[in-house]
Image (tube, coloured by chain):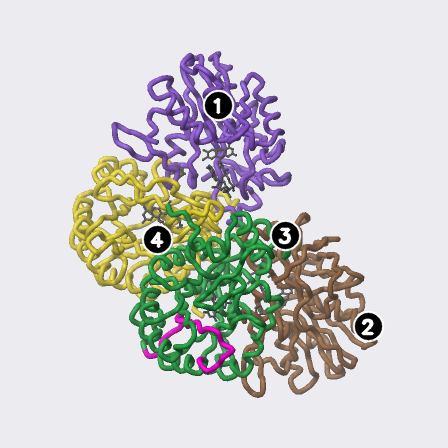
Chain colours: A brown, B purple, C green, D yellow
Amino acid sequence: MKLHAVEVLERERFGDHALIRYRWTGTPPAPGQFVMVRIAGAAQAFAPFLARPFFAHDYDNEVVSLLFEIRGRVTFLLSEEDSVLLVSDPLGRGYTLDNGPVALVGGGVWVSPLKLLARHLSRSGIAFDAYLEIPATAPGAYAAWIAENYPDAILVRTQADSDAPQATLESIGDLTRYAGLYASGPTPMLDAVKRFSDGTVPAQLALRERMACANGSCYGCAVPLWRDGVREYARACVDGPVFPAKVLAW
Amino acid sequence: MKLHAVEVLERERFGDHALIRYRWTGTPPAPGQFVMVRIAGAAQAFAPFLARPFFAHDYDNEVVSLLFEIRGRVTFLLSEEDSVLLVSDPLGRGYTLDNGPVALVGGGVWVSPLKLLARHLSRSGIAFDAYLEIPATAPGAYAAWIAENYPDAILVRTQADSDAPQATLESIGDLTRYAGLYASGPTPMLDAVKRFSDGTVPAQLALRERMACANGSCYGCAVPLWRDGVREYARACVDGPVFPAKVLAW
Amino acid sequence: MVTHRAMSAGEGASVDLTIELCGIPLASPLIPAAGTLSKEGFGETKGIYGAMLPKTVTPRPRVGNPPPRIAEVSSGMVNSIGLQNPGLDRFLNNIDDYGVGLPLFVSIAADTVGEFAGMCERIAGEERVAAVELNLSCPNVEHGGLQFCAGPGAVREVVTACRGAFSEKPLFVKLTNEGVVGNAMAAEEAGADAVTLINTIPALVVNAHERQVLLRGGLSGPAIKPIALRAAYEVSRAVGVPVIGVGGVTSGIDIAEFMLAGAAAVQVGAGSFVWEPREMLEEFAAYLRENGLRARDLNIAMTEL
Amino acid sequence: MVTHRAMSAGEGASVDLTIELCGIPLASPLIPAAGTLSKEGFGETKGIYGAMLPKTVTPRPRVGNPPPRIAEVSSGMVNSIGLQNPGLDRFLNNIDDYGVGLPLFVSIAADTVGEFAGMCERIAGEERVAAVELNLSCPNVEHGGLQFCAGPGAVREVVTACRGAFSEKPLFVKLTNEGVVGNAMAAEEAGADAVTLINTIPALVVNAHERQVLLRGGLSGPAIKPIALRAAYEVSRAVGVPVIGVGGVTSGIDIAEFMLAGAAAVQVGAGSFVWEPREMLEEFAAYLRENGLRARDLNIAMTEL
Ligand SMILES: Cc1cc2nc3c(=O)[nH]c(=O)nc-3n(C[C@H](O)[C@H](O)[C@H](O)COP(=O)(O)OP(=O)(O)OC[C@H]3O[C@@H](n4cnc5c(N)ncnc54)[C@H](O)[C@@H]3O)c2cc1C
Ligand SMILES: Cc1cc2nc3c(=O)[nH]c(=O)nc-3n(C[C@H](O)[C@H](O)[C@H](O)COP(=O)(O)OP(=O)(O)OC[C@H]3O[C@@H](n4cnc5c(N)ncnc54)[C@H](O)[C@@H]3O)c2cc1C
Ligand SMILES: Cc1cc2nc3c(=O)[nH]c(=O)nc-3n(C[C@H](O)[C@H](O)[C@H](O)COP(=O)(O)O)c2cc1C
Ligand SMILES: Cc1cc2nc3c(=O)[nH]c(=O)nc-3n(C[C@H](O)[C@H](O)[C@H](O)COP(=O)(O)O)c2cc1C
Ligand code: FES
Ligand code: FES
């Protein structure tokens, strides 16, 4: 996998969430695409060994940003001031833009790709509403940051169990008025969106199965799909990470 | 192995050689003792896995210094400005001080422990001369640094093969006038000193067999010795690293 | 560990990287390890790989295992893909996907000796295939699920059958580390033209916080390199056929180490997920230049202890 | 891997770390792996280790292998010590060196089945010894140098002989990863009270620049942890006797992983050269506290897939 050393322009930290901006003069990422990331210092060592996938959170005149939650070693190193980044070109199949009005349904850190999506929708004059669920478990600083960075979004700050997706979908009210749904959130939310969309409004879901090669070689990022009536595993890295809800064989 | 995080006070770099000074309030190192070193950042990762041994180059009011040659990953990281050090207590058996006059015979980066030895000899009023060989392969900056830091030493800058030990011993002239020899240098030099000392002047040699545990547990740092006529392997980390030349079964 | 990767392709050009493997001339000793390079991942292959080696194919399509299929471990990864593949028919129909101007090696696996031989027979007629690699790290349903490389007897049986069905072209036999020397000798006796070693090593990843097995699969990556080097070393001294070394390669120095240990060619798997094979080959070329050696001389260039 | 090592011993105090191994009560499930802790390295042992386990002893003194004996590799080390030890007589004369108030386990190895049994007989009379661990990863000179754990037959033979000579106290059998399940079952049949797995894995380190084999020895450290976990998992499901897990432990979470995989006790080797067992145990205690578990419950605390 070809990784490029990039210049980090800015790091923001809000609680256990963080944002990183780097200069990128290569192919611009499309909404829903991801990049593979390694830390250069650790690049010669083997810990961590694999590169890690992150959605392109935003892209604006040659600056890519990634929004992430600090979970383990790579995300910790990413959030460190002095870490040097190696990133891949934008990878995978993102969201397909279609007629509006559409609803963006996101939750937790997974709202990340919806920022770039909103930018593209606006640019293409496609009407949309954004509904973002910020779990109670997420730090206030993150909720505040989201509110600021998704100004037109309707924020749902779940109080109790962050994974209760109904909370979100109900609060949104009648989704049938939309021509399409673009979702990226915790698994239960994606579940709910898929269940709702079956037979009603077509939805596109951004998945995040663990990856190794990110180029279709290892078959590690398996996503169960229906293909001509047969249930088989697609690869999130080349066939996704965004999939139409209706083809998912969950 | 218990390692302590220490404050690095200074780093000097001369060509591919470097010096590092750190604050040390623990047991002072004795001449010829060594410390195990790891880099804190990499401490949680496993590359490098093992800690590395380095002679105590000098010790003066709560400051220990290490003199090293950049060979691989650990020594490279050590020389980096921002690296955070983890070091062990001083370990092993160093030089035994005895009646003067004595000669210190050193070469290359291995002259390191002779600095602290010289300090202790002076302090104990034991007369000594220091003969240091700086191989042609060593950077001039290092030779200059040695000249400056071992002001009273007789420097031999070998021109051709850095490993030609005769060059050194001959240049020293009649060593038999000394009551003892304290050596730390490239293997061929230690060899020559041992061969010379057999039957003449007793010598103590600082060895540096690769180590893993540094506390006598792994038997990795084997040094062949004669013990009551039997050839067996001693452990450099607990029985050395300094050994009387006459017991070495080379 | 990993050294000067930043070398230009140009510099690499001058040295002789070519080798001959069972009579097949290869432009380089580097080959993708089975299951670690698909057509989507090709990128540049010319001037890097000496041959193309797709993922193991089975007689019928296999859906593979449910996720999670991969987990990271110290200096490596554990995978449990379950040989997902389209099956021999679809593979042969789309075989031109792998026509990138390099000799094409085909890795196969099956449930029975008969199926193994049957696949060899079909592939024998396919002139676009230069050689077959038998992946014997799969369960033999006729022998209670014991792997085909469970022991010399099992190896001899399946290799003999395949040799009979595939007599015209080179037959490689890929083995796991367990019992590798005895199994390699059995493979040679049964007519194998080369042995590929090693496959991933059975491993387990536990998630202590969830108190669950995260993954039960095969370990690969730098963690297994010393084990794979040992296998290449011992086997190349026990058999007369070429050894294809694989396990933990991430750099050009690694390629050199395997060839010095006795490997005639080297495969790279997990390492290619993280680093660029092109850079590995450039580092390897630089190593050859510094040491004034040709790739094909390396496996006899070691000074024995 | 990323852990909170900086915990105070006090915090650790509250949880129940005790286990029982073959009827022997241990204050903690952590035991030094044979050959990785000598008396010079003891430091503090009370409140950390559940038992003491010195380096393998042989009938006669062994000088060991010439240096180099160790080399660093990715996430681990390779060693070739050659069982250097003073021999059984001197060991027994100085056995009080290991009297640190912990149950004393003694690891033994020999060249023949008869010698193994002979050692067991002598040690049986030594009341300061709580249990014996047979190190079967050594060559059997009567069987052309094949290891005593080369296969179930060989294992059964030596364990049966030792069991006969050592009937009063627990007998542990230490195995390598190769063929571990079958060998463990054979050991149990032959009367072993517990199995210890795994020993180092045969490995090779090549110095490409010198074009030399740097070391031919055994791999240990984090690199082999997933392999050792797999062994503990499979064997604990195949035999009824306790499994003592060993391989790549460097943290308290690692101890938990081995016990979750099915190990009744855990040994730490190379990891103790780099990190402090005390900190590992403290992290392990914190893990138990967070999960409201006792050490002895862990090996049944895994939610099966
Ligand atoms: C296509 C794709 C896009 C992604 N985009 C983002 C993003 O924009 N922001 C973000 O914060 N994360 C994103 N992720 C997840 C991200 O890759 C992981 O958080 C990251 O790999 C964690 O690495 P680590 O070394 O910090 O943690 P590790 O030590 O690797 O893991 C720490 C914990 O995180 C869990 N984890 C690891 N990978 C995943 C995953 N894929 N899904 C859920 N849990 C996981 C592990 O199980 C473990 O419990 C994305 C994943 C994929 C596949
Ligand atoms: C008791 C003792 C004291 C030491 N004191 C010093 C010192 O004061 N200054 C100093 O520069 N070095 C000293 N060394 C050697 C030092 O430990 C190594 O240079 C260091 O481990 C290299 O680590 P690395 O990761 O940088 O290189 P690695 O990647 O570990 O090795 C790089 C190269 O150095 C070689 N090397 C590694 N260890 C040794 C060794 N022990 N002797 C000779 N060659 C070796 C390797 O074979 C390899 O070719 C001492 C060693 C011992 C045992
Ligand atoms: C994701 C993945 C898939 C693999 N699939 C196959 C396969 O289909 N057939 C096969 O013979 N080996 C397969 N292997 C094993 C590799 O070919 C190789 O033998 C092993 O990974 C060791 O090499 P490495 O350390 O360079 O990865 C696979 C390995 C990985 C990591
Ligand atoms: C330096 C060293 C010496 C060892 N000596 C012995 C030994 O004498 N007897 C034995 O049964 N195992 C011996 N082993 C193997 C360990 O006991 C253990 O099984 C193996 O190292 C795996 O554990 P680890 O990864 O925690 O080191 C030794 C291991 C090392 C690293
Ligand atoms: S990550 Fe390898 S196929 Fe998708
Ligand atoms: S380094 Fe382990 S015994 Fe000396």
Disc number lying in front (4 or 1): 1
* Residue type of the residue flagged with mark 2: Ser
Q: Is residue A26 visible?
A: yes
SS type, badge 1: helix
Which percent across, then down, holds residue C139?
38, 74
The chain identifier of the residue carrying mark 3 reads: C
The residue at label 1 has a CB less than 8 Å from ligand 2:
no
Q: Which residues are magenta?
A: C124-142
Amino acid type at mark 1: Thr
The residue where tag 3 is placed is C6
Residue B217 sits in quarter: top left
Question: Dot 1, how many residues are within 10 Å of its Cα: few (below 14), some (14-19), or many (20+)?
Answer: many
Q: Is residue C23 above or below residue B131?
A: below
- Count how many numbered circles sit on residues in the image: 4
User: Ligand 4 near label 4 (Cβ, under 8 Å)?
Assistant: yes
Q: Nearer the viewer, residue D107 or D100?
A: D107
Crowd class of label 3 (few under 14; some 14 to 19; many from 20; radius 10 Å): few
Residue type, numbered disc 4: Asn
* Chain under callout 4: D
Q: Which residue is mark 1?
A: B168
Label 4 to label 2: alpha-carbon separation: 62 Å
Q: Which quadrant of the figure contains the C terminus of chain D? A: bottom left
Q: Which mark is residue A122?
A: 2
Q: Please state which amino acid type lies under the numbered disc 3.
A: Ala
> Can the viewer see residue B24 in this picture?
no
